C-alpha cells in the first residue's frame, strides 16, 4: 500500500508524542511501536521503519534521545552515556560504505563514459576518498581521547557533521 506524505507525517507525529516522554533504557517492540503510532496491521514494515526513523530524528533534535535498533525486536531509547558508542559505531559503518563506494567507482569503465561523466566519477571518487580518510581519523582520535573529553566535545561533533554534509552535498544529484 502506497502511503502519502500526509499519512507519514501524521503517524510520525503520533509516535513522536508517545515516545518523547518515555524513559531512557525503554525497549519497544515493533508491534508496540506500531500500536503507539496508531498503525493497523495492513501497514507494511517498511512504512513502520520509515516512521520510526523519522521519529528518531525528531527525538534527537528536540529531546536529546536516540532510538537504537534492536535487531529482530524493535527499538530502544538508549542512555545518554551510550550515545558515544553508538556514534562511533555509525562512523565505522560509514567508513565501510565509503570503501564500497570507492570500489564501485574504481570499477567504472572510464572508456565508455563521456568526458563529463568521467569528470563526475573522478570528483565523486575524490569526495569518497576524503570522507573515508576523515572518518578513519575520527576513529583513531576517539581511541586516544579520555572519556571526559569525549562527552564534552559536542561543538566538534557538530563541526564534523557540517563538514561531512558539505563534502557529500551534490547539487546535481542528492543520491551520492
Image (tube, grey):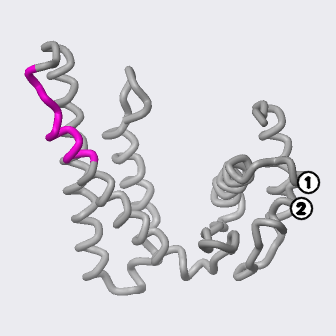
Judging from the image, what secondary structure is the residue with disc 2 in? helix
Return the mark for residue 38.
Answer: 1
Q: Is residue 76 left or right of residue 18?
A: left
Q: Residue 71 appears at what percent x and percent y? A: 60, 72
**Relative to the observer, which residue lies in front, 78 or 75?**
75
| 137 relative to 175, above or below | below
Q: Is the residue 50 above or below the residue 89 in the image?
A: above
Which mark is drawn over residue 110?
none
Tell me where residue 112 sits by quadrant: top left
Instruction: Quarter of the image for the N terminus: give it.
Output: top right
- Can you tell which quarter of the image residue 125 is in? top left
State the residue at coordinates (27%, 45%): 101
Relative image position of residue 157 (x, y in whole percent): 41, 61
Rendered position, 102 above or below 7: below
Graded by Cα atoms within 10 Å as few (under 14), some (14 to 19) or many (20 or more), the crowding at tag 1 reads some
Q: Residue at x 40, y 42 (%)?
A: 165
**Image disc number at residue 35:** 2
Main SS of residues in magenta: helix
* Magenta run includes residue 34: no
**CA gap, disc 1 to disc 2?**
5 Å
Q: Report if the CB atoms under discs 1 and 2 are less than 8 Å apart.
A: yes
Residue 71 left/right relative to 100: right
Q: Is residue 54 left or right of residue 147?
A: right
**How far from the left and from the top, in percent, is residue 169?**
38, 34
Q: Secondary structure at mark 1?
A: loop
The residue located at (36%, 55%) in the rendering is 160
Quarter the C terminus occupies: top left
Q: Residue at x 61, y 68 (%)?
A: 69
In this picture, is 118 found above or below 6?
Answer: above
Side (left or right) of 62 relative to 144: right
Q: Which residues are magenta?
A: 101-111
Q: For this rendering, which residue is in front, 6 or 139?
A: 6
Amino acid at each position: 500500500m502506497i502511503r502519502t506524505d500526509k499519512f507519514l507525517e501524521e503517524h510520525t507525529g503520533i509516535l513522536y508524542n508517545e515516545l518523547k516522554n518515555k524513559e531512557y533504557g525503554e525497549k519497544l517492540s515493533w508491534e508496540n511501536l506500531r500500536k503507539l503510532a496508531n498503525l493497523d496491521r495492513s501497514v507494511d514494515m517498511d512504512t513502520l521503519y520509515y516512521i520510526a526513523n523519522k521519529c528518531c530524528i525528531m527525538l534527537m533534535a528536540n529531546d536529546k534521545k536516540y532510538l537504537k535498533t534492536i535487531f529482530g525486536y524493535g527499538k530502544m531509547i538508549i542512555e545518554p552515556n551510550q550515545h558515544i558508542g553508538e556514534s562511533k559505531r555509525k562512523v565505522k559503518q560509514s567508513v565501510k560504505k565509503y570503501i564500497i563506494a570507492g570500489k564501485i567507482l574504481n570499477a567504472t569503465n572510464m572508456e565508455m563514459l563521456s568526458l563529463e561523466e568521467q569528470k563526475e566519477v573522478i570528483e565523486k571518487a575524490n569526495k569518497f576518498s576524503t570522507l573515508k580518510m576523515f572518518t578513519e581519523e575520527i576513529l583513531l582520535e576517539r581511541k586516544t581521547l579520555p572519556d571526559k573529553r569525549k562527552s564534552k566535545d559536542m561543538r566538534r561533533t557538530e563541526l564534523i557533521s557540517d563538514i561531512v554534509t558539505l563534502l557529500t552535498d551534490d547539487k546535481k544529484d542528492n543520491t551520492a
